[in-house]
Image: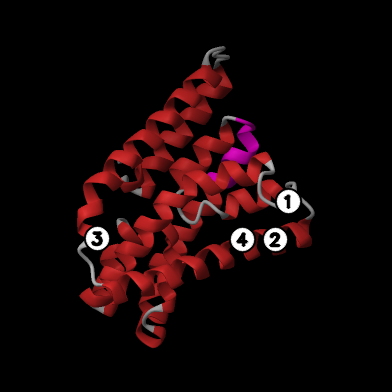
Amino acid sequence: MFKNASASRITIVFVLGVIVGLITKVKIIDDFLWVTLFSLIFLVGVSMGLDMSRILAMSREKILWSLKLVIATVAGSLSGGLITYLLLGKPALRYSLAISAGMGWYSFTGTYLTSMDPYLGFLGYLSNVLREIYTYVTYPILGKKLRHSPISLGGATTMDTTLPVITSVSGSEVGVLAFIHGALLTLIIPVIIPALVSGLLP
């Protein structure tokens, strides 16, 4: 899965893409982006289907805890997008919310927003990469003091890239919560971002 790729590799590919975009004008790029986006969503569906039995095998208590964390993560992320818009006045509110709704999943957020505007794609990619990096830096400190709530820092990445640091700091029990949290966010992010961009949500 693309979301499992390291941030450094994604960054290298991104920079190469910028270079190609500067030196050539490829007319089919928009169609290619949409094909890539739909392929990404399909592969996410396959991945989640393979993991679903593992998620359903978790205890009810852990799933409920993870649901609470998901609600907190979504609310906090969207609040961050709203505050950013109120402070800066740009990009438009729906795009600010969509970028924050990426919740660490930079490959999907960047690709989706780039299909509409390269600048929005850049913002979506960069802000969500920084969220993942921020999680690596701050979780070892906050995870020891607050135990469960810092899981929200990692957003969707808590089911893969940031799961090792969460487990190493807080133990396997919290790691299970983090996995379910990230898995559920991975399911809803491809729904909530298009809904925000299209104006289907207030």
Cα–Cα span, label 3 and label 4: 28 Å
Mark with earlier residue (2, 1)? 2
Query: Mark 1 sits on what residue?
Result: 93
Do the residues under discs 2 and 4 have CB atoms within 8 angstroms?
A: yes
Do the residues under discs 1 and 4 have CB atoms within 8 angstroms?
A: no
Query: Mark 4 sits on what residue?
Result: 78
Disc 4 is placed on an element classified as helix
Query: Mark 3 sits on what residue?
Result: 56
Q: Is residue 162 visible?
A: no
Q: Please rate how many residues cluster around mark 3, counting C-alpha atoms within 10 Å: few if below 14, some from 14 to 19, many from 20.
A: few
Mark with earlier residue (3, 2)? 3
Do the residues under discs 3 and 4 have CB atoms within 8 angstroms?
A: no
Cα–Cα span, label 1 and label 3: 36 Å
- Percent across and percent down for residue 200 are 66, 44
Q: Is residue 48 visible?
A: yes
- Percent across and percent down for residue 69 are 44, 71
State which mark lies toward you, 3 or 4: 3
The reply to whether the magenta stretch includes residue 46 is: no
Q: Which residues are magenta?
A: 116-125
Residue 83 falls in which quadrant of the image? bottom right
Instruction: Indicate the amino acid at tag 3.
Output: Leu
Q: Is residue 44 above or below residue 70?
A: above
Residue 9 falls in which quadrant of the image? top left
Instruction: Indicate the amino acid at tag 1.
Output: Leu
Disc 2 is placed on an element classified as helix
Q: Main secondary structure of the magenta part?
A: helix
Numbered disc total? 4
